[in-house]
Image (tube, rainbow, N blue to C red):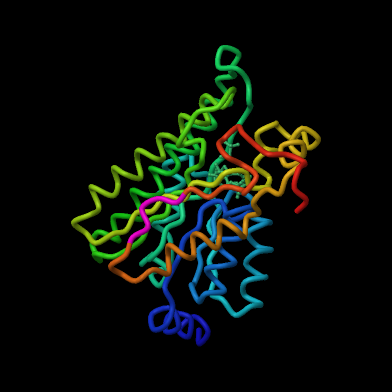
Amino acid sequence: MFSSWFLVLKLNCMEKIALVTGATSGIGEATALKLAEEGFAVIITGRRQDRLNVLKHKLERGGSSVFTLCFDVRNEEEVNNSLENLPPEWQDIDVLVNNAGLAAGMEPFQQGDSVDWNRMIDTNLKGLLFVTRFVSQSMVVRKKGHIINIGSIAGKEAYPNGNVYCATKHAVDALTKGMRFDLLPYNIKVTQICPGAVETEFSVVRFHGDKHRADKVYEGYECLVADDIAECIWFAVSRPSHVNINDMVVMPTAQASASVFQKEIYPS
Ligand code: NDP
Ligand code: 8X3
């Protein structure tokens, strides 16, 4: 009893709240760690409860306030139920990081698998919409908030065999701009961060568990790591209230475009 009152007091008085989707791995996990380190109370989400528990314990050991929500962003009802049932002291979310996302497959368009297409469209696009609509409604009432969408270099240009993944990330790019218009009257910032190659579980997922093929994506050059993107997110979050970072494209030094890399020339 005492501890829950203490938590309410602590959250109300001191901490801003960030919700990070896809915090069980990669960029989302690094972002949750960074925001917690910077003093945010964090709501961490994903489908793998075991990983959420591990991260929660790690963050709590560092003194952070943490709440876990296990849901699939593709399922509108699950998204709404999970967010509706947040305890009152966790409901006023200041920063939403829409990070959950994936690529599935890398085949020529004409050989594409519609199961993969649906996964990408439902996760990267509809999932982001479901989560953002819910969270933004309370930001609108409070006339403050910051939404950060994780786009991609794949949302700025297409590349061979990237077809549907690129289309979903182009849609995130367009939605980021659209959200900025619609939320402008409510003092809500909308930022997009577009990374190039970051070594996470992304390619293992893209190649349906083929770790050998995934490793090849990151061979021969120094790719980004999840912490590099978490730092960029923190930069955007930590600007003064009158400054919004609209868009940030962040690449490895050895990557000039989605598909042009300089490999095995310069040692790291
Ligand atoms: P990871 O595979 O390491 O992490 C993806 C995260 O998304 C996991 O936490 C996963 O959680 C979550 N996720 C996936 N599907 C769902 C779902 N249906 N419901 C809820 N959560 C889901 O990849 P990254 O960290 O690299 O990817 C994060 C974001 O960054 C993605 O949007 C990706 O497109 C983008 N990106 C990645 C780049 C890269 O090179 N790695 C470059 C540019 C952009 P769980 O499985 O537990 O649900
Ligand atoms: C992930 C980066 O270039 O594989 O969005 O599409 S890429």
Residue found at the very far left of the displayed protein:
185
Query: Does the image show residue 204?
Result: no
Image point 75% across, 47% down: which residue? 266
Query: Does the image show residue 11?
Result: yes
Instruction: Quadrant for residue 77, please give it.
Output: top left
18 sits to left or right of 225: left
Indicate the position of residue 43 as horizontal and vertical percent values. Answer: 50, 63
Q: Which residues are magenta?
A: 244-248
Indicate the position of residue 261 as horizontal and vertical percent values. Answer: 65, 37
35 sits to left or right of 49: left
Image point 70% across, 32% down: which residue? 208
Instruction: Quadrant for residue 262, please give it.
Output: top right
Indicate the position of residue 192 as horizontal and vertical percent values. Answer: 42, 50
What predominant SS class does the magenta segment belong to?
loop
Q: Is residue 245 magenta?
A: yes
Instruction: Quadrant for residue 186, please give it.
Output: bottom left
> Relative to 247, is 158 above or below?
above
> How many marks are shown on the rendered structure?
0
138 sits to left or right of 217: left
Q: Is residue 117 magenta?
A: no
Residue found at the very far front of the displayed protein:
265
Q: Depth check: 120 or 247 in front?
A: 247
